Amino acid sequence: MERTTSRQRVYNGMPARELGSEGWHKPWSGGNGGNCLEAMKLADGRLAVRQSTDPDGPALIYTSDEMTAFIREAKAGEADFLLT
């Protein structure tokens, strides 16, 4: 499903509502009271991330390579400092 048109400029920090309400997924969820990240794959292959409790807030836009690197490094423990 295409969520953006060629006329729509997708940029980092744009209001997430401009990307529409369809297609957002919670890749994981835990016992955090519903405070989750939601992600959407865009038509051009980039990924949008937003805070689930603020669906009208900013969307952070990442390339597939950026997200792959982040996930790979997080799995390797490189982001563990964020938890302490």
Image: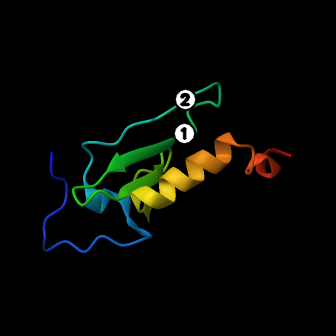
Give left or right: position of 30 versus 47. Answer: right
Which residue is label 2 attached to? 29
Which residue is label 1 attached to? 36
Query: Residue 37 at x, y = what percent?
Result: 51, 44
The 10 Å Cα crowd at callout 2, few under 14, some 14 to 19, many 20 or more, is few
Give left or right: position of 16 versus 35. Answer: left
Q: Is residue 21 above or below residue 9?
A: above
- Quick one: 28 or 13, which is closer to the camera? 28
Verify CB contact (< 8 Å) between mark 2 and mark 1: yes
User: Can residue 58 be seen?
Assistant: no
- Quick one: 17 or 3, which is closer to the camera? 3
The residue lying furthest to the top in this view is: 31
User: Can residue 28 be seen?
Assistant: yes
Give left or right: position of 30 versus 20. Answer: right
Asked which secondary structure carries label 2, the reply is loop
Q: CA distance from mark 2 to mark 1?
A: 6 Å
Query: Residue 66 at x, y = what percent?
Result: 49, 60
